Amino acid sequence: PKGWKALDVLMVGGGGGGGSSAANSGTSGGGGGGEVAQLRGIKVSGGDVIAYAVGAGGATQAGSDGDGNDGGTTSFGNFSAAGAWGGSKGSTRTGGKGGSATTGGAGGIADTAGSNGSTEGVNPVTSSGGGGGGGGRSSTTGGAGGTGLSAGGSGGLTNGAGGGGSYGLGANGPAQNANGAAASDNTGGGGSGVNNSTAGAILTGGAGGSGLLQISRVD
C-alpha cells in the first residue's frame, strides 16, 4: 500500500501428514513440523508487487498403507519457509523430518522421539526448524514429536506417534486402533501417525496443519 516503507513478515511452512497403516502393520510415523522464518524490517516501496504463497498441510493416504504427504512451502518474494516431510507408513515407521534443510529436526525411528528443531540466522532473517515426527514400531509404541517453536505431539506405549511441533503444536498420537489426529490449521504442526493391531482395517494418519503468512507494517 501507498506509504508503507518496511515490513515484518512471519512465514510458517505446512506440517507433514502422518503415515497410514495396513492391518497389523504396527505404528506409522508422525509428520514433521514446518519451518518458521521471521523477516524483520524488510524494505518496500508503495506500488511494489510481491508474490506470496501459503503452504498447505500434508494430506494423508486414506485407504492405503502409505506415507503421509509433505507440507507445502510458504513464501514471500524471494524468502520462504519450508514444509515438513510426511511420516512413513506402518511397514517402515520413520517420522517425517521437520521443515528446513539445516534447522529441521530428524524424524524418530523405532519408537523414538523426533529430534527438536534449532534456530539459526540473525536479523533481519531467522529460521526455526520444525520438530521431527515421532517414530513408529512393529509392535505398539509410538514416539513423541520433536519440538519446534512449540511442542511436538505425545506418543506412548499403546499410542500412535506424535507429530512434530512448529509455530503451533504437533498432533498427539491417538489411542491404539484409532485413526490419526490432524494438527490445527495455520500452525505448521505435524499430523500424528497411527497404531494398528487390527486384523482387517487400514488406519489413516492425521493431516498436517497448514502454514501461515503474517505481514505487519513497522515504519
Image: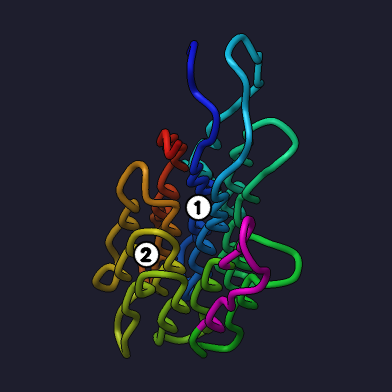
Give the magenta-colored segment's residue range: 114-128
Q: Residue at x 29, y 84 (%)?
A: 158
Q: Residue at label 1? A: 15
**Residue 72 drawn in magenta:** no
Tell which circle, 1 or 2, labels the residue nearer the N-terminal end: 1
Three-letter residue code for mark 1: Gly
Q: Is residue 108 visible?
A: yes
How many residues crowd mark 2 within 10 Å: few (<14), some (14–19), many (20+)?
many
Q: Residue at x 53, y 44 (%)?
A: 58
Q: Nearer the viewer, residue 194 or 23?
A: 194
Q: Is residue 120 left or right of residue 153?
A: right
Locate residue 113, reporting x and y percent. 49, 86
Q: Is residue 44 left or right of residue 183?
A: right
Three-letter residue code for mark 2: Gly
Q: Is residue 166 left or right of residue 54?
A: left
Do tag 1 and tag 2 residues touch (Cβ < 8 Å)?
A: yes
Q: Residue at label 2? A: 170
Q: Which secondary structure lies at badge 2?
A: loop
How far apart are the two marked residues, 1 and 2, measured between alpha carbons? 8 Å
Quadrant placement of the C terminus:
top left
User: From the viewer's perspective, is residue 154 above or below residue 30?
Assistant: below
User: From the viewer's perspective, is residue 120 above or below residue 178?
Assistant: below
